[in-house]
Image (cartoon, helix red, strand yellow):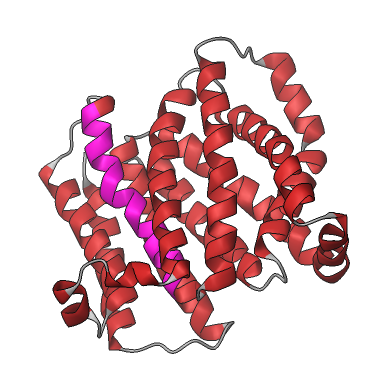
Amino acid sequence: MTALALALVLLSAVAHASWNVLLKRAGDPEVFAWCMLVFSTLLLTPLGVALLWYNSVGFPGMWFSVATMVLHVFYFITLGRGYAQGDLSLVYPVARGIGPMLVPVLAVIFLSETIEPLAIAGIAAIIAGIYTISWWGNFHQVLRSPLLFLRSAGMRYAVLTGLIIAAYSIVDKEGVGYIQPVLYMYLLNVGATLMLVPYILGNKGRSAVGTELRVNAVPIAVAGLLAFAAYAMVLSAFSLSRVSYVAPAREVGIVMGVLMGVYLLKEPFGGGRLLGSTLTVGGLVMIALSP
């Protein structure tokens, strides 16, 4: 992985963990997620228009753009529901962990990418770290009943979110080959915002939107900018390096999320989380050193 791609991934990880903390603190995470999409879309419209003026958007790029819009609609719904029914320290690592576990396999199958042995070891270390953080102290239960964790609604939504992350990572790796990455991100924002309107207004109502805006106007604005910047940096990294490297490496944000949970949300930090964080950072280093 190049130095620039790695820097983009690390900055993205900090931004991503930060907006997820703000989302977890929301009164209604689903409404909060939509409001932050609206804010970032409106604020960045001049940039989007300028990028459209100087960059063409044709086929097949547009098909990838539409596909990622649909996937991100479901992503924000499942992520919001996960945070509404589960802890940040549980939902975030699992949702972010499923993706990198599947992306390298999908990249080899669908994108004909190859993975160096050191990178394979790094990916394995990151995945091991993620699940150590998530399930430390419950390994015996997981081994006896692998699907036990799915009894929790928060966990079910976390797993669904992870599957969606894996799918849109593959779609977006191809999409940024046809559309400039920041423009691609802006189109994603616009499409997901509009597609979510019937769901938010039909299921939540205008009063819920008004309440969330009154209570969390500043966090919504900050989260919107962080979310846009975080994924725009990942898309740029996709254009510079292999998706099978970028997707797992960006999960160093899980360590950031755990630390934010400890210091901002006062969640416990035991030996399992320390070991998991160490494994994750070690995996990132191995991927960064891979050619």
Q: Is residue 291 left or right of residue 239?
A: left
Q: Is residue 26 above or below residue 182?
A: below
- What residue is drawn where x is 38% and y is 64%? 94
Quadrant in which the N terminus is drawn: top left
Front residue of 199 and 171: 199
- What residue is drawn where x is 48% and y is 47%? 8
- What residue is drawn where x is 11% and y is 45%? 117
Q: In the image, residue 31 lies at what x, y percent?
A: 72, 58
Range covered by the magenta-colored residues? 90-109
Q: In the image, residue 205 lies at what x, y percent?
A: 82, 55
Residue 244 among magenta residues: no
- What residue is drawn where x is 38% and y is 48%? 163
Q: Is residue 271 above or below residue 201?
A: below
> Given the current orientation, which residue lies at the most extreme left position?
117
Q: Is residue 194 above or below residue 79?
A: above
Q: Is residue 167 left or right of residue 84?
A: left
Question: Which SS type dominates the magenta stretch?
Answer: helix
Residue 96 among magenta residues: yes
Q: Is residue 109 visible?
A: yes
Q: Is residue 103 left or right of residue 211?
A: left
Q: In the image, residue 75 lies at what x, y percent?
A: 53, 48
Front residue of 217 and 280: 217
Q: Is residue 232 visible?
A: no
Q: In the image, residue 167 lies at what x, y percent?
A: 40, 38
Quadrant in which the C terminus is drawn: top left
